Image (cartoon, rainbow, N blue to C red):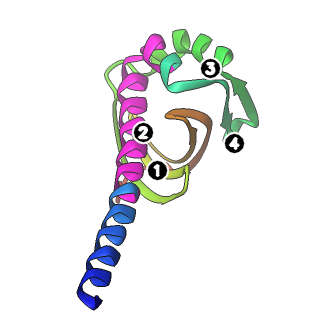
Amino acid sequence: MKAIKAIVVAVALSMVLQAGLFHASAQQSIVDRWYAALLQADRAALSELLADDATIRLDDLGVTQSKDEFIASMDEWQSAVKGAAIRHRVESEVGDTVVVLTCYDFPNNDMAMRETFTTRDGRIVANTQMTIGEDCEGI
């Protein structure tokens, strides 16, 4: 009986851990796809990643954009990102919220950012961006 109970507990624990890893993997996938689309100013991919009610908050500028406003800003962003690279790494993850350290490596300067993504049903419902440095050491 103890052996069966131990097996049941082990299987249940394994399922819980796998579910957590799947969730983390899904979050990482969304973040990876976000930066790939952002680097290309790919409006269709960004639109697919953002929920219809998504908000994008640019803390440094004091601006909050709707999904439509953010997608419309891609015309200007496309020029700014030409020749750039974007590197990122997950700093933390709690539930549906992921905090990412991001380096925007523009041809003439670097910018380090902390970006927070909140997701729901596989789509981004909120993104907050804040500058944390003029260089990208450690990212």
Report helix, strand or loop for mark 3.
helix
Give the main secondary structure, helix, strand or loop, of the magenta stretch.
helix
Q: Earlier in the sequence, mark 1 or mark 2?
A: 2
* Amino acid type indicated by mark 1: Val
* Amino acid type indicated by mark 3: Phe
- How crowded pointer 3 is (Cα within 10 Å; few <14, some 14-19, many 20+) is rated as many
The answer to whether the residues at label 1 and label 2 have Cβ atoms under 8 Å apart is yes
The answer to whether the residues at label 3 and label 2 have Cβ atoms under 8 Å apart is no
**Depth check, front residue: 107 or 31:** 31
Q: Give the distance between the C-alpha atoms of the residues marked 4 and 1, in whole angstroms.
A: 15 Å
Q: Earlier in the sequence, mark 4 or mark 1?
A: 4
Q: Mark 2 sits on what residue?
A: 31
From the viewer's perspective, tell me whether residue 43 is left or right of residue 52: left
* Amino acid type indicated by mark 4: Asp
Q: Is residue 106 visible?
A: no
Would residue 72 be counted in the magenta stretch? no
Q: Is residue 14 visible?
A: yes
- How crowded pointer 2 is (Cα within 10 Å; few <14, some 14-19, many 20+) is rated as many
Q: In this rendering, is residue 122 above or below 100?
A: above
At x 62%, y 20%, the residue is 70
Q: Mark 1 sits on what residue?
A: 100
Q: Mark 4 sits on what residue?
A: 59
Q: Give the distance between the C-alpha atoms of the residues marked 3 and 1, in whole angstroms.
A: 19 Å
Discs 4/1, front: 1
Q: Residue furthest bottom?
A: 2
Q: Position of residue 116 (x, y in %)?
A: 56, 47
Q: Position of residue 95 (x, y in %)?
A: 55, 56
Q: Give the distance between the C-alpha atoms of the residues marked 1 and 2, in whole angstroms.
A: 8 Å
From the viewer's perspective, tell me whether residue 26 is left or right of residue 121: left
What is the span of residues highlighted in magenta in the rendered image?
20-46
Residue 52 in which image quadrant: top right
